[in-house]
Amino acid sequence: MSFAVQAGCPAVRKCESAADMADAVGEMYSSEAEDAILLWNLVPVRLAYGYDLAALLDDLVPLLEEIQRPDFVETQVFWGSDTFSAEWNMVREDDALRIQARWHSTLGNYESLLTERGDSVVRTQTFVSEWAKVLQRIVSDIEAESVELEDDDVFLRAKVMLAA
């Protein structure tokens, strides 16, 4: 498979309230917590829950919503964490996505190797289901901790997506 995500099982710290889902994730998972792993054309890229995923959430949920729309054709997303920085241009090809990436930084400095491996082509539903594993972990942990979110928009949208 050219694209996969391993959610892992990070330890959760107590978090009673947060401004939004991203802030809750930043508080709930320490830097020592188990990472998620993004597999890009057989290259594993670590994504720290408390840092990388916290930074990606506000773009990830809308991206997953967008690519599932019947009229979706193409989009771009910029992942802007220091240890996971990339620009992805995503184009629909029948029931798949072609993801052309420009890698800026990754934990482990795999940018050159990731660039050598080229585009990732993945079925749209596979792409969504792979990221859903991470979202399910985060949503479950927020619910288990009964975290009160001041702005719950992204959290509620993630729940709706996971329920579908």
Image (tube, rainbow, N blue to C red):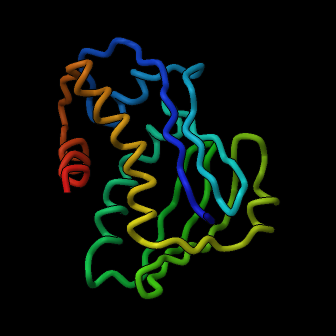
Residue 47, placed above or below residue 3: above
> Along the line of sight, which residue is nearer the eye, 32 or 134?
134
| Rendered residue at 39%/55% (across/down) | 59
> Along the line of sight, which residue is nearer the eye, 130 or 78?
130
Rendered image quadrant of residue 120: bottom right
> Along the line of sight, which residue is nearer the eye, 78 or 114?
114
Image mark count: 0
Residue 130's spot in the image, x, y percent? 45, 54
Extreme residue in the bottom direction: 94
Q: Is residue 31 left or right of residue 113?
A: left
Quadrant of the drawing holding the C terminus: bottom left
Residue 17's spot in the image, x, y percent? 24, 20
Q: Is residue 102 left or right of residue 131?
A: right
Residue 52, placed above or below residue 32: below
| Rendered residue at 61%/74% (across/down) | 100
Residue 90's spot in the image, x, y percent? 49, 75
Q: Is residue 66 left or right of residue 43?
A: left
Extreme residue in the front direction: 1
Q: Is residue 115 left or right of residue 19?
A: right
Quadrant of the drawing holding the N terminus: bottom right
| Rendered residue at 50%/33% (across/down) | 49
| Rendered residue at 31%/69% (across/down) | 66
Residue 133, placed above or below residue 68: above
Rendered image quadrant of residue 24: top left
Residue 88's spot in the image, x, y percent? 55, 67
